[in-house]
Image (cartoon, helix red, strand yellow):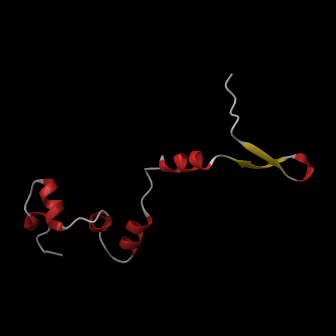
Amino acid sequence: MNARTNIQIINGPGGKPAFVVIPHDEYIASHVEDRDLIPHDVISRTVDGASPVKAWREHLGLTQTERAHRLGVTQSAYCPTGK
């Protein structure tokens, strides 16, 4: 059996485990895997009135023209109102 040796358990009152300490790299790696979460910036933009499509486009730093090009359409077809 391959037991982990790079963690530390800190016991609390009464000798019961209260905290587990793991290496920083492992902590970061475990949070990078949470790719199904919506970034705070996108949520904030939608709360402020942007459509989800616009919020994501702006979050990714894309113009309407760049997004339209990636979709293979003209900018006016992507957003006829130009907003």
In the image, is 55 to the left or to the right of 9?
left
Q: Residue at x 15, y 54 (%)?
A: 71
Q: Vertically, is 67 above or below 8? A: below
| Residue 65 rendering spot, x and y as whole percentages | 13, 65
Q: In the image, is residue 20 above or below residue 43? A: above
Q: Position of residue 51 (x, y in %)?
A: 29, 69
Looking at the rendered structure, the number of numbered marks drawn on it comes to: 0
Q: Residue furthest bottom?
A: 48
For image coordinates 57% across by 47% down, the residue present is: 25
In the picture, measured across the screen, residue 51 lies left or right of residue 36, that is left
Residue lying furthest right = 14
The quadrant in which residue 59 appears is bottom left
Quadrant, the C terminus: bottom left
Quadrant that contains the N terminus: top right
Relative image position of residue 60 (x, y in whole percent): 30, 62
Q: Residue at x 40, y 68 (%)?
A: 41
Q: Nearer the viewer, residue 52 or 75?
A: 75
Image x and y of residue 16, in percent = 86, 46
Q: Residue at x 71, y 35 (%)?
A: 5
